[in-house]
Amino acid sequence: MAAAPNDTQPKWRRTSKPRTRTGCHNCRRRHLKCDEAKPTCLRCVKSHLTCEGYVEPSKASKEVCKTTRSILPKDPQPRLSIIRPSEQLETRNEVESRYIKHFYNKSSSGLDGILNWSIWNRLVLQLSNREPFIHDSCVAIGALMKAVDIDESLLEDEVNSGSLQIAKMHREFALLKYGRAVKQMQGALIGAELRLVLVACLLVFCFENLLSNRFEALAHATSVQPLLREWLAKYDQVMPTSQRLHSPAPVIVDEELVEAFNHLDLQISTIYDPRPADAHRAAIREGLEAVKTMPPIFYDLSEAQSYLVAVMRRCHHFLATTWPSSETHALSRDFEIVPPEDVIITTGINIWSTSYTVSNSLRIEQQEFAEDIRRWSQAFQPLFDSTRQSETIGSRSHLVATLLRIHAINTTIVIAGVLFTEEVAYDVFLHEFQELFDLATIVVQAHRKKSGYIHKSAGFFLDLGIVAPLYLLVNRCRDHSLRVNGIELLRGWHVEASWDPRLIAEIGDFMMDIEEEGNTDGFIPEKSRAVFTAVCEEPQRQTRHEAVLQCVQRYGGPGGRPVWHERRVFF
């Protein structure tokens, strides 16, 4: 990440000499301000003109451009605040205006998920009119999304040097603005209201995910969770049980923010969760009373969603408390292949961990959480059936209900799996795996019909989509055709926040190759089945990514001893 300058002003603003004005011949002839992009002016590109080149700048001007790039705009004082983000947004110059509009367009027309995206296109943009660090963060995200859009298009078409240069300039400007925003945050958030702290965290989470720094993004989301939980705990005694799933004081912390961070809590637990046991036990207690009073039938999707998130959070945090007692780390070992990074995800750090041993107390405790998800599924079934009617097919309610059902199936299998010490036990869920795949296919087809293609970039996604459940399918389902189809679905899908479908597809291929080697009759015996135990990923910007994968056939060796396998993959 590019570092912010030591002072608040850009470096070219601090020089004692005036900046030499240069520009392409087209802009100078038309008396227009030139952005001086190289190799061709962006104004000329957008006006479909042939850029005629530049006036040779002075030596001093060249030295300044080496540091700041010619795309760096001037930065006068902001204009008056605008209330409606869908109209003219407050910006400081034309360049930032384009990036802010791109931010708004992306956050308004993004792929539908369970969460409403108004948190980006309403709350964040309104706050950007009075908080400079939010404004600069939105500009940075808009600029980075421009670069990502170009990178995606180059994956489909022949590489163009001019497009690569334009993407590079968008990215460099994004890093400059982000560095400035982070520096502003450090001062602005001291003693600030909780709403601003939470919004700042969301912006950092979004930007770092766009940079493929998913562990940085998750670390920020994890660090802010205790502040929100502490604030919510203040209202426990005065809030009716039915209201504990929502913001107790929306004037202080918006309902959308509470909802977003509940979903981020689920993101953390599915990828890399280093939080202490006390934090997990507190989270389990947090939703207990609300889940106990869950209605027998849900009548609207919002109610069903709120209760499902509460059930899932309790289940995920329960799974985290089982890792020490079930000795999940006994199934992993250090990599023999040199890993590309220091951060290694092993079994025993997320909800997909495999139990090495199961105690009687764990079996008793697991029943409570299995019953929670069973009651939710039963209460949701009539509402789910109503969204399958012909008049609702293809609607947002149809899509949201589909996603809710996907996550309920996923949670049911994961909670049951904490008691499994043999992989053949997952075969009982073949019907559920088939339904999970069918529902995920509905989601993919709905988005292809809506937009014509699938965006590959991450960013604004805060809730779990279909990649995490499909990871469960390609990892635990041993039906060959279902696995192959699941991998194919992943390869055509987009990154969902910290979940990269390309990596999950590589894991699916790896597991299939190990388990099905030499198999001819279709059924995979227990000794051939493997447990995925570790992954270490190094994202390579604008090119391919690298990862090292590890799995173990715990009964595959002589005398039933474990056999580990590793593979380096690029995707």
Image: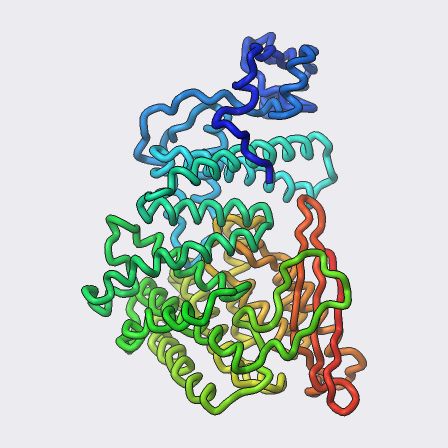
Residue occupying image coordinates x 39% and y 55%: 260
Q: Is residue 2 left or right of residue 243?
A: right
Q: Which residue is drawn at 41% across and 67% down?
A: 279
Camera-side residue: 288 or 361? 361
In the rendered view, how is the structure colored? rainbow
Q: In which quarter of the image is the C terminus?
A: bottom right
Determine the image quadrant of residue 428: bottom right
Q: Where's residue 96, x and y in %?
A: 48, 28
Residue 310 visible in the current orientation: yes
Which quadrant would residue 388 be assigned to in this image? bottom left
Q: Can residue 571 be seen in this view?
A: no
Q: Residue 69: x and y, percent?
A: 62, 25
| Depth check, front residue: 480 or 347 | 347
Residue plotted at (38% across, 29% down): 90
Name the spot of residue 140 as percent of width and height, x first.
51, 36
Q: Is residue 16 left or right of residue 222?
A: right
- Up the image or down, 379 lies above or below 265; here it is below
- Residue 306 occupies quadrant: bottom left
Q: Position of residue 110 (x, y in %)?
A: 47, 48
